[in-house]
Amino acid sequence: MHEMSIAMAVVGQVEEAARAGGARAVTSVRLRVGELAGVVPDALAFCFELACAGTVLDGASLVTESVTARARCGSCPGTWAVGMPPELCCPGCGRATDVELLSGRELEILSVRWEDGPAGARTREPIPEEA
Amino acid sequence: MCRVVDLRQAVLAKNDVAAQVLRAELTARGTTVVNLLSSPGSGKTALLERELLLARERGVAVAALTADLATENDAVRLARSGVPVKQVLTDGLCHLEAGMLGRHLDGWLPEDTRLLFVENVGNLVCPATYDLGESLRVVLASVTEGEDKPLKYPTAFGLAQLVVVTKTDIARAVEFDEDAFRAHVQQVNPGVEVVLTSARAGEGLGVLLDRALAAGAGAATHTPVMARQQQSHGHGHGHDHGHDHVHGPDHDHGPDHDHVHGPDHDHDHDHPHVQPAAQSR
């Protein structure tokens, strides 16, 4: 269960960016998680909530975009979804000498939504469309 | 005022950078790190005991660091070989990280060490995600674990540069199907070498040492397909891609302009170039 370590890494990086950007409160974090990243989204969501407690991310929601793992063979046309467990030999020619993984290993913070201004400086309630 | 800020940071960027720094430092002083991953009880320690003894007989300066949740039993066993051994207790943490490894090496690892074997925490899930600055990643599986282990733990087996089967002396008793195991390894990691070993019967001993020495001498190591993802937003490439461009106030679209990133920010499109995998992970 390394999702706690992952969640803490996410929170640490977002905290740094929020501090540098003068954020008052982080309301959501958008992550991209590849099928082959070795991370369980449910476990990560659970850990994320814990890791946020007491930080500028307290109460922030986690939005996870999953990315299908796809590969391509240099000798054959097209790409394929490698599936889980992954099939990394080319389904066309059966070889793997020229196979390239196009996606699936992502583990990336895409974007963060935050409220600007020093703590306690909220000037109005956010309108629902923003939340 | 609420706004969306692009971060585009690899979650494990810090670990990846720490691993690269450690790899560069150790390589510069002539030390090669071998990261050993397996389930608990697969026979990592038994095999390593034999390999350390062999290294000592051949006059190769080796050291071993072993990580466990608790107990120093493994270090006691490995220390019988007479080479420098260090036990790291992770206090429950399921994996090692590059920064932790670096701190443990400080002031302990003898300067002339050519090979450092790192026996990771017995676990095939979590350690697979963390580059430790190794030059050779080895995954071990014993014949008792089932031929479909590579399919159950595709990240661990998929990123290995060498697969070692252990306890082959009891392969027949447990009806180990070598062909099925090899086929499953090929499925998730085409082209990786599979070595059969038995610490008890002596089969395949010295191969791990040879491969580690070859990697240290600069021989090309296997680059798994899973480590060949071309675009740089996944973690696990041999270069730094922690570009953190926080948009300043000039990029602020104001409270009524909420930009959610659509498919144009999706990087799953085709690039004809492959990032050269200086270090495959």
Image: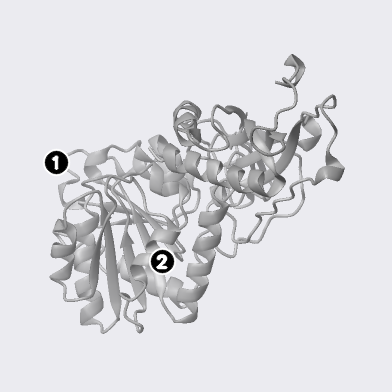
Tag of residue B173: 1
State which quarter of the image contains the N terminus of chain A.
Answer: top left
- Judge depth for marks 2 and 1 and give the one in front: 2
B221 shown above or below B57? above
Q: Chain of mark 2?
A: B
Which of these two is toward me, B54 or B31?
A: B31
Which of these two is toward me, A100 or B40?
A: B40
Q: Which residue is mark 2?
A: B102
Q: Amino acid at mark 1?
A: Ala
Q: Secondary structure at mark 2?
A: helix
State which quarter of the image contains the C terminus of chain A.
Answer: top right
At x 35% / y 36%, what residue is drawn?
B148
- Residue B124 drawn at (x, y percent): 35, 44
Q: Chain of mark 1?
A: B
Q: Amino acid at mark 2?
A: Gly
Q: Secondary structure at mark 1?
A: loop
Q: Are marks 2 and 1 on the same chain?
A: yes
**Apparent side of residue B70 relative to residue A88 in the rendered image (left or right):** left
Tell me, yes or no, if residue A8 can be seen here: yes
B74 shown above or below B123? below
- Residue B243 drawn at (x, y percent): 70, 54
- Residue B280 drawn at (x, y percent): 54, 58
At x 85% / y 27%, what residue is drawn?
B257
- Residue A2 drawn at (x, y percent): 41, 41
Residue lying at the far top in this picture: please name it: A128
Mark 1 is surrounded, within 10 Å at the Cα level, by few (under 14), some (14 to 19) or many (20 or more) other residues, namely few
Mark 2 is surrounded, within 10 Å at the Cα level, by few (under 14), some (14 to 19) or many (20 or more) other residues, namely some
Q: Earlier in the sequence, mark 2 or mark 1?
A: 2
Residue A15 occupies quadrant: top right
